[in-house]
Amino acid sequence: MSESTLAVLAAPRLGPPPAPRVPVPQRWTLANGLRVIAAPRHGVPQVVLRLVLPAGAMADPPGYAGTASLVGHLVAEGTASLAAEELHARLDLLGAAVHPHVGHDFAEIELVLLSETLREGVGLLAEIASRPSFPEHEVERVRAESLDALVARHDEPANVADDRAALEVFGAGHPYGIPSFGTEEGIRAVPREALVAFHAERYRPGGAFLVAAGEFDAGELREALEAGFAGWTGDAPPVVYPPAPPRPPMAGKLVYQPWEDAAQSEIRIAGGGMARRDPDWIRAGVTNFLLGGSTITGRLGANLREDKGWTYGVRSSFSAGIVAGGWVAETAVDVGVTADAVSEMLREMRRLAEEPVDEAELRRAQDALMLSLPRMFETPAGVASRLSTIEAFGLPHDWWDRFPAAVEAVTTADVARMAREHFDPERLVRVVVGGGMEG
């Protein structure tokens, strides 16, 4: 056996995270006032068209919570020139798919299609957005499906905990306090005429915008959009937002809902957040990442999952909103450790506010956030989502370019301030659905 020499090499030094390649979109406004943000990229012959309108649940008429959601799901169920079956057959023939989504602030119609069918797809998207017919039988079918979904939702402790936490933070008088899909009373009561009126008022090019991402020629897209949306005109009125409560009325208190035969408890610790345009958004985001932005490396995950083995996942997050949204930390644990889990979550929140965070821990969080950025722009859907965020919340056009430097600038003092402002248990309400909190 011959002798050999084993060379021990020093581990390579990690450099700074690479700068992300953020697409620079083209922007223009159609003759009818619809803003367009287009990010062509060659490679995969797919296009995502996302039409975003100020027609979310915030605009629901009084007494008819659920109007925006019903309208959003009915626009693709028949138009002035195509019955629902014909419309879906046309989409199938193009290899396209339409995905409606209605949140609190906005309604979205997303169309995913092949590059070679762009012009036909734009025509169908325009037909769906501007000329839905709201057939009576489709209205009742979607209404019944929505009510069935609500009944099923009430059977899931996780959903019950989510809804109760939002109600406790915002109250029933604020639209963020009830689900964006509405209430059983509102869905049952709203007449077809109110749905038609909501669409006529809210689905207008003025105030809306369209994001296009994927493989297309910008000139051809512009021509197709001008032709497809030519007959669509008007402006949507501004949405009036009620003020959010400065802190939950039940702040510092426990809301406990026992659940018969529960094996696990759903825990939500929730409070007020901030508007998406808030200058502290990134500072708060880094602070949240340290606490529960990552279910494994965040402090909540390191404690409850990795150390105690009480849960498969625990996370925390801010909700983006035109006005101040919410913040919530959430997990599910065996009923036998429910009280201890709540206590540990609150302890981690206090610790982040009261004890200076270690520089190395902050560094890891900053690197993780910056390294996640390129992945956000990998697909046309991801690009459309990121660009929609900028346009929807009125952020600077180079917001994503500035993101790494803004994350890098967050200090340990910023973390302590954000933790005191948002994670103070005296500002938060605890909601538990399950067991283990008796006595």
Image (cartoon, rainbow, N blue to C red):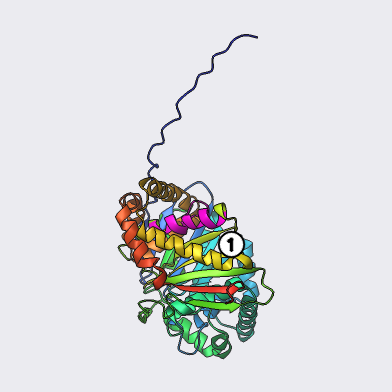
Q: Is residue 323 above or below residue 386?
A: below
The one of 330 and 353 positioned closer to us in this rendering? 353
Residue sitting at the far right: 261
**Which image quadrant for residue 200?**
bottom left
The N terminus lies in which quarter of the figure? top right
Residue that appears at 60% across and 55% down: 309
Q: Secondary structure at mark 1?
A: loop
The one of 198 and 231 positioned closer to us in this rendering? 198
Residue 393 shows up from this direction: no
Residue 24 shows up from this direction: yes
Return the x and y of residue 115 as percentages of the image width and height. Answer: 53, 55
Q: Which residue is mark 1?
A: 96
Write the start and end of the magenta stretch as one range: 287-305
Return the x and y of residue 331 as percentages of the image width and height. Answer: 55, 64
Residue that appears at 36% across and 54% down: 400
Q: Is residue 213 above or below residue 184?
A: above
Q: Is residue 271 magenta?
A: no
- In the picture, measured across the screen, residue 409 lies left or right of residue 88, that is left
- The number of callouts visible is 1
Q: Is residue 114 above or below residue 237?
A: above
Category of crowding for the residue at label 1, using alpha-carbon neighbours closer than 10 angstroms: few (below 14), some (14–19), many (at least 20):
many
The C terminus lies in which quarter of the figure? bottom right
Looking at the picture, which amino acid does disc 1 mark? Ala
Return the x and y of residue 382 as percentages of the image width and height. Answer: 48, 56
Residue sitting at the far front: 439
Q: Is residue 293 magenta?
A: yes
Return the x and y of residue 298 as percentages of the image width and height. Answer: 47, 54
Predominant secondary structure, magenta span: helix
